[in-house]
Image (tube, helix red, strand yellow):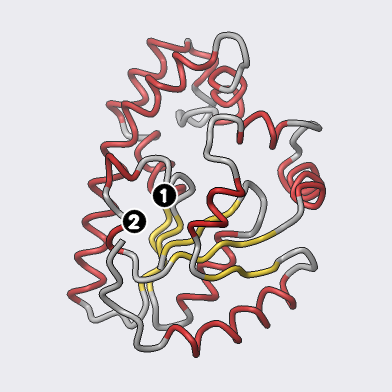
Amino acid sequence: MGVLGGIASGKSTAARLLAGPDGVVISADELAREALDSPAVLERVRARFGAAAIGPDGRADRAELARLVFDAERGAEGLAELEGWTHPLVRDRIAERLRAARAAGAPRIVLDVPLLLENDAQHGLVRLCDVLVFVDVHDAERERRAQSTRGWKSGEVARREAAQLPLAVKKRRADHVLPNDQGLPELKEAVARLLPALRGKSGHAR
């Protein structure tokens, strides 16, 4: 299963619920953090963005990097470089975890990959998904959550999503939609309704 949705929509929570206790969630964000903090990438980050991009703990300062690479005027080139260093590592690690999950006979494998559609030409993961699930949350609520839980400034969600496919496109590509405006109880109920409909679905060509 591939999970789609906007920033701060609850995709990771939905992925865990869809996988259930016996399933496997493969999180691109988790793997990206590992890749970013690898020695080779940290060296490139320091050389390209300066010592301020490295935190006192020796890891990448993600807030500083985000400020630089999502800058509307000068960030695009830096973002492309950063993704060029990390994305190949993330793709390799996703493939490794997919192989391991299949070998272990995991009943459900859920891909929590924020740019699942945008980067499909590079990773080819969409065709491996039997179903795509879109987590649906109104823009104002996502903005509120990002400010509340991440400390983001007003407009930051829209600024970052400007480089992604429109949410309307992602929603159209999805096979199922999970409402999540009201929070965890609503999302749990939606997943509970959806899972029985997904049983037996496999080999869906995309």
Q: Mark 1 touching mark 2, by CB under 8 A?
A: yes
163 shown above or below 18: above
Horizontal arrangement in the rendering, residue 118 relative to residue 64 (left or right): left
Residue 89: which quarter of the image? top left
Question: Image quadrant for the C terminus?
Answer: bottom left
Say which residue appears at 40% left-offset and 19% top-offset.
45
Question: Image quadrant for the N terminus?
Answer: bottom left
**Most foreground residue, 36 or 119:** 119
State the mark number for residue 116.
Answer: 1
Give the x, y percent position of residue 25: 41, 66
> As shown in the figure, which amino acid type bears the numbered disc 2?
Val
Q: How far apart are marks 1 and 2 (CA)?
A: 7 Å
Horizontal arrangement in the rendering, residue 188 relative to residue 130 (left or right): right
Residue behind mark 2: 126
> As shown in the figure, which amino acid type bears the numbered disc 1?
Leu
Question: Secondary structure under badge 2?
Answer: helix
Q: Disc 1 or 2, which lies upstream in sequence?
A: 1
Question: Secondary structure under badge 1?
Answer: loop
Say which residue appears at 42% left-offset and 47% top-offset.
117
Say which residue appears at 44% left-offset and 13% top-offset.
77
Q: Residues within 10 Å of mark 2 (few under 14, many from 20)?
A: some
Give the x, y percent position of residue 4: 52, 56
70 shown above or below 158: above
**Most foreground residue, 167 or 97:** 167
**Most foreground residue, 149 or 61:** 149
Horizontal arrangement in the rendering, residue 121 relative to residue 18 (left or right): left
122 shown above or below 194: above
Give the x, y percent position of residue 181: 77, 63
